Image: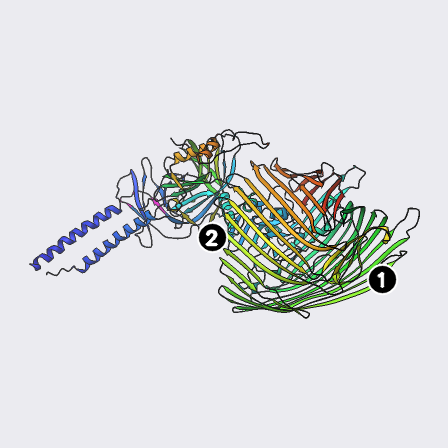
């Protein structure tokens, strides 16, 4: 039976399987005959099984090239084209992206289905025109095409930078990213300017820059990558191709007039920028000058770049041990009160030595004459409700020269980092002030400063560790002089005079080694070092015809402070929780101090974050607080020190809570801080009237005594923000409160003052269509000062300064910007002074350059009054303002 | 029990058939179940659209068409850049106020994202009206183009003219046969070449290609129906347009309908006023 059935079954199984094969074939392949349509299927050549959808199949006339029929394959790879009325021959083409094209010539209609196999391959376009996006993200780098952020009217790259998300540019020119100062500004990847990057940002035309890159968490030292977390960012200005390896120059020339027209000196503002960037040499040279109130030193400011750059100078500020009066600037800005004439020249070059090393040479020189005029009325609180008001008018003029030279060698690779830098800065300042008070005085100050710095850093990584050796030394000399003369009358010669020659020599040196070890989330950092501070102050008085103190007097003081420190730190960072604890042990000469620090940052959820920190620090007073003197600061203020260093201990506690819900577009921010400062010394303020005094004018004597004093301060800030993504509208309200208590001795009476400051700030930003942007700011502040103990004195001041800024784009080439501010200053209870300010700027683009015109102080305000409070007094200031002026200019590149 | 053995040739035949059937069904299933794709090419368009009938102004936008093997995605690059920049700033810890200030100079484009599924001949449409996301799906209309002989060179590509009626407008387009893609800007597709330029006969809406790039880096296109977004509202094209029209022409009611109470409306001088009403000019009309 089996013998019979098996062959039969095999036979029927064979037939059955063949039938299945035919049926399956029919399902997957359609068959068509005739001339009404062409059908077929397209497969993948590698297996001839997998169908390819979305393949274009075209039939074109072989003569005209016109497409006569076309289709696209379906999901199963099949296609069908209607051929009614079409004539042969025809060219059939099957093509799809990612596959090589197949071309067939049809001389006769296909009899059966067409089966086409496509091979995978790169699809080539005739021409690829790549359009880079405005913003692209790559790891920690954000790339911004300048064209996307450039607005008509931008004349420097600084104006474009302000619009880059996350970047703020302060009035000083300092660039901050996410509220932290950047640690470097590169031009085409090279850090040619160091801390003086405003030379580039305030002078380079945006057309020269193709892309702005922001390197988040930028570690400029390659050997430290992965070891030392860096929260700050760096900015790279990538040059346009046409600006590379070429000498590029741009110029800006403007002239104008003030009022009264033709009677006032003509105004000018000029700039010439010449630079070249190639692989071996980068050089940037700027010559700039103006007499319209813009301080020339703005471009040459040394900005804070943090410790990450490993080349921070110990001291960058100008120190004036003495000075004339009349040099202050009001809250509305220096450019409204400064009458100047000056300029600077700056040359910066970077030479590449191999791939990893470079030498930079920077030389600059600035010269500027300045004039200001101000009056002040100071009310002194003398106790027993007694006050006295002293009026004074100062007409200030000054001339300052500032040369600077800087040479740096740097080798920066993953294997090691080495940097050696020498910097020289000089300042020669001659300030003169004519003072009209109860007497007519002439105050003359010669303020010189010479700083020479040397910095050496060496960093070597090894497996999970890194070793660092650093030394930073400053040698500084400040020979300064203050000379005061009293003129009795125009007819009589000068008969009273007093000169003070003061000289400060100092050597500051910070030297240390640091060892970092890393294991996963933990890092242990141990650093040890020796910091030295040596200061010597000598002061000589030479008086003319006075009978009272100080007479010919010579005094010298010097001090030496050495700080031997060892500081172990433990750090934990897993992105959600960050804890850093440090226990520095410091030996200040013979005093051993422990100054612990703790900081915690915890991200509770995607909306909530809490930050808390505690810091304890110990400082010792410098030579100006030690010098027993007296030291004449200006004609009205004298200082005396304690004869030996005093210790100040401060403890700072900060707590912040942030609620940020981007889905609801709501942000709440609360910050509380408490500061406790304990001083070993107390400042004594004493007011002396004119009788029996120098020059017969009243004066104030500040002296330090070893009596403990406490200064405490609390501050609270609340911020509420609501914005709408679908409407270009933003509402922001910020409340700030500061409460400070300070102790002093005033008129020999122990006094405790309480100072309260409140402010409310509201801002509205919105756009009207595409051609108008409007920003409204409403800041209000109130200051209350009262004495809790001792000399009775209280004051309360408020100010309200609403501003409205509007930008109108009249056409593609014309733009008008109007800035208006209303300053409402309270000078006494219920009495307010109102100062409206308005500036208008018009820009018109021409083919190769730009014409611009600017009108400043449209309402021609000539003076500005406001009050401020101090510990012993309250002062009403009156500034002479620059009048209305008009300037027109042309900027171009060549 | 009888032993049943098949000869070698039969075994091979059965095996081959099973393999064919298995691959066939697996491949069909993989096509139909595919929810994402990798873009091979990006086409950049500059578009102009007249949003309001009562205004002559046209909004300019920068659009991109990412084309993959199975899907394509059409969207506004201006909107994408703005959204991704905002996301970066938010991730960096900035408040919405700071985010707004930092991004206010960036252009805001269209919110529409159109994903075409070639295999299933469908379009997935996602957009936003007053902070609410909407999604609808509709067939991808490819047929009924009228091919013409006129030619035009765009970006060094020889383009041919075609036209058709689509959703209430007559579209005149220029397509490049040298680029073997059926795709085009917005919902336009179905020609034997990539559409490089399209304009409706009234001139209210236009798209013109100003850049093409082959994508070396991986760009994923995901069909919107697979997006796990609980906040999105599924609807159809006609209803979506009605909602949009309402939000433009009667914003007050639309806001009230969302459950908000309008306390007052004032103009820039603080004078009581009404919310201005506009007349929407839609790129398409449903019957």
Is residue A62 visible in the rendered image? The answer is no
Which percent across, then down, holds residue A291?
A: 76, 45
Circle 2 residues within 10 Å: few <14, some 14–19, many ≥20: few
The residue identified by callout 1 is A553
**Residue designated by label 2:** A605
Q: Is residue A807 visible?
A: yes
Q: Earlier in the sequence, mark 2 or mark 1?
A: 1
Q: Residue at x 68, y 57 (%)?
A: A348
Chain hosting mark 1: A
Image location of residue A427, percent across then percent down: 76, 57
- CA gap, disc 2 and disc 1: 67 Å
Q: Is residue A421 above or below residue A99?
A: below
Q: Which residues are magenta?
A: A103-113
Give the chain of mark 2.
A
Q: Position of residue A683 (x, y in %)?
A: 73, 57
Image quadrant of residue A448?
bottom right
Q: Position of residue A532 (x, y in %)?
A: 69, 67
Number of the front mark, 2 or 1: 1
For label 1, the SS is strand
Q: Few, some or many C-alpha atoms within 10 Å of disc 1 (few <14, some 14-19, many ≥20)?
A: some
**Is the image coloured rainbow, by chain, by secondary structure, or in one colour?**
rainbow
């Amino acid at each position: 039976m089996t013998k019979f059935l098996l062959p039969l079954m095999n036979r029927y199984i064979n037939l059955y399987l063949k039938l299945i094969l035919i049926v399956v074939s029919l399902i997957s392949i359609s068959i068509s005959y005739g001339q009404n349509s062409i059908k077929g299927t397209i497969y993948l050549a590698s297996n001839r099984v997998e169908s390819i959808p979305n393949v274009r199949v075209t039939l074109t006339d072989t003569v005209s090239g016109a497409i006569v029929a076309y289709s696209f394959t379906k999901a199963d790879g099949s296609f069908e084209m209607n051929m009614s009325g079409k004539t042969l021959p025809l060219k059939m083409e099957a093509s799809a992206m990612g596959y090589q094209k197949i071309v067939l010539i049809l001389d006769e209609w296909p009899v059966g289905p067409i089966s086409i196999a496509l091979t995978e391959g790169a699809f080539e376009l005739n021409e690829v025109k790549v359009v880079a996006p405005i913003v692209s993200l790559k790891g920690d780098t954000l790339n911004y095409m300048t064209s996307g952020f450039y607005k008509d009217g931008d004349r420097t790259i600084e104006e474009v930078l302000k619009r880059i998300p996350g970047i703020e540019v302060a009035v000083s020119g300092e660039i901050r990213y996410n509220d932290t100062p950047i640690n470097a500004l590169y031009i085409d990847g090279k850090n040619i300017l160091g801390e003086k990057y405003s030379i580039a940002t305030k002078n380079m035309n945006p057309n020269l820059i193709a892309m702005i890159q922001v390197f988040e968490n930028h570690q400029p030292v390659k050997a430290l990558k992965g070891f030392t977390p860096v929260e700050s960012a760096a900015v790279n200005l990538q040059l346009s191709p046409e600006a590379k390896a070429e000498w590029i120059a741009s110029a800006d020339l403007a002239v104008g007039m003030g009022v009264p027209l033709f009677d006032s000196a003509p105004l000018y503002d000029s700039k010439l920028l010449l630079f070249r960037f190639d692989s071996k040499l980068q050089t940037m040279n700027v010559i700039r000058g103006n007499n319209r109130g813009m301080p020339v030193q703005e471009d040459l400011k040394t900005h804070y770049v943090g410790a990450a750059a490993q080349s921070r100078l110990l001291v960058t500020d100008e120190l004036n041990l003495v000075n004339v009066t009349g040099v202050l600037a009001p809250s509305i800005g220096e450019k409204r009160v400064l009458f100047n004439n000056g300029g600077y020249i700056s040359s910066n070059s970077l030479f590449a030595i191999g791939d990893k090393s470079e030498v930079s040479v920077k030389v600059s020189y600035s010269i500027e004459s300045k004039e200001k005029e101000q009056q002040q009325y100071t009310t002194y609180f003398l106790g027993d409700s007694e006050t006295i008001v002293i009026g004074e008018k100062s007409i200030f003029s000054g001339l300052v020269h500032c040369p600077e030279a800087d040479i740096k060698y740097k080798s920066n690779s993953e294997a090691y980092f080495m940097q050696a830098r020498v910097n020289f800065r000089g300042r020669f300042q001659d300030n003169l002030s004519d003072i009209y008070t109860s007497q007519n005085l002439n105050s003359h100050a010669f303020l010189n400063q010479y700083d020479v710095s040397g910095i050496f850093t060496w960093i070597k990584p090894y497996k999970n560790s890194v070793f660092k050796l650093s030394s930073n030394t400053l040698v500084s000399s400040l020979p300064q002089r203050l000379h005061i003369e009293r003129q009795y009358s125009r007819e009589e010669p000068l008969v009273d005079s007093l000169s003070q020659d003061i000289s400060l020599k100092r050597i500051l040196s910070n030297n240390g080694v640091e060892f970092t070890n890393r294991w996963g989330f933990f890092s242990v950092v141990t650093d040890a070092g020796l910091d030295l501070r040596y200061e010597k102050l000598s002061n000589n008085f030479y008086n003319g015809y006075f009978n009272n103190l100080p007479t010919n007097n010579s005094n010298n003081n010097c001090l030496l402070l050495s700080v031997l420190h060892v500081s172990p730190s433990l750090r934990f960072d897993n992105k959600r929780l960050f804890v850093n604890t440090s226990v520095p042990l410091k030996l200040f000469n013979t005093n051993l101090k422990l100054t612990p620090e703790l900081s915690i940052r915890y991200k509770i959820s995607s909306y909530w974050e809490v930050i808390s920190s505690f810091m304890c620090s110990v400082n010792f007073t410098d030579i100006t607080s030690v010098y027993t003197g007296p030291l004449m600061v200006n004609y009205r203020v004298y200082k005396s020190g304690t004869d030996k260093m005093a210790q100040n201990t401060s403890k700072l506690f900060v707590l912040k809570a942030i609620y940020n819900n981007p889905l609801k577009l709501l942000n709440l921010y609360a910050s509380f801080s408490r500061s406790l400062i304990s001083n070993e010394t107390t400042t004594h303020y004493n007011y002396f009237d004119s009788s029996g005094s120098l020059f017969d004018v009243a004066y104030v004597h500040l002296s330090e005594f070893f009596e403990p004093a406490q200064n405490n301060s609390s501050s609270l800030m609340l911020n509420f923000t609501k914005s709408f993504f679908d409407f270009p509208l933003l509402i922001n309200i910020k409340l700030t409160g500061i409460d400070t208590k300070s102790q002093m001795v005033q008129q020999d009476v122990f006094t405790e003052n309480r100072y309260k400051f409140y402010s409310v700030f509201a801002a509205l930003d919105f756009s009207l269509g595409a051609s108008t942007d409007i920003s409204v700011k409403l800041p209000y502040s109130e200051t209350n000062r009262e004495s809790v103990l001792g000399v009775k004195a209280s004051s309360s001041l408020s100010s309200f300064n609403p501003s409205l800024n509007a930008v109108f784009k009249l056409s593609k080439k014309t733009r008008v910007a109007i800035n208006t501010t209303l300053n409402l200053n309270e000078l006494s209870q219920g009495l307010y002074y109102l100062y409206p300010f308005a500036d208008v700027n018009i820009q018109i683009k021409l083919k190769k350059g730009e014409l611009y015109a600017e009108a400043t102080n449209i309402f021609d305000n000539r003076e500005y009054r406001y009050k401020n409070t101090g510990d012993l007094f309250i002062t009403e200031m009156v500034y002479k303002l620059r009048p209305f002026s008009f300037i027109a200019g042309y900027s171009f590149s060549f | 029990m009888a032993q049943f053995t098949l000869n070698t040739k039969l075994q091979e035949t059965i095996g081959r058939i099973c393999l064919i059937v298995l691959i066939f069904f697996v491949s069909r299933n993989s096509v139909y179940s595919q929810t994402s794709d990798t873009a091979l090419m990006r086409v950049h368009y500059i578009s102009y659209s007249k949003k309001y009938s009562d205004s002559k102004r046209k909004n300019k936008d920068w659009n991109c068409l990412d084309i993959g093997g199975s899907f394509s995605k059409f969207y506004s690059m201006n909107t994408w850049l703005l959204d991704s920049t905002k996301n970066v700033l938010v991730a960096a810890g900035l408040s919405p106020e700071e985010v707004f200030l930092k991004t206010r100079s960036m252009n805001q484009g269209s919110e529409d994202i159109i994903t075409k599924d070639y295999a299933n001949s469908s379009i997935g449409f996602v957009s936003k009206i007053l902070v609410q996301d909407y999604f609808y799906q509709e067939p991808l209309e490819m047929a009924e183009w009228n091919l013409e002989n006129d030619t035009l060179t765009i970006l060094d590509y020889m383009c041919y003219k075609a036209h058709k009626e689509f959703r209430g407008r007559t579209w005149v387009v220029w397509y490049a046969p040298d680029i073997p893609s059926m795709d085009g800007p917005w919902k336009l597709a179905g020609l034997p070449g990539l559409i490089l330029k399209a304009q409706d006969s009234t001139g209210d809406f236009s798209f013109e290609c100003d850049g093409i790039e082959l994508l070396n880096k991986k760009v994923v296109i995901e069909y919107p129906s697979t997006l796990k977004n609980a906040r999105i509202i599924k609807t159809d094209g006609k209803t979506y347009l009605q909602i949009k029209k309402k939000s433009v022409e009667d914003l007050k009611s639309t806001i009230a309908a969302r459950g908000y109470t309008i306390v007052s409306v004032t103009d820039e001088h603080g004078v009581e006023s009404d919310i201005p009403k506009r007349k929407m000019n839609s790129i398409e009309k449903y019957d």
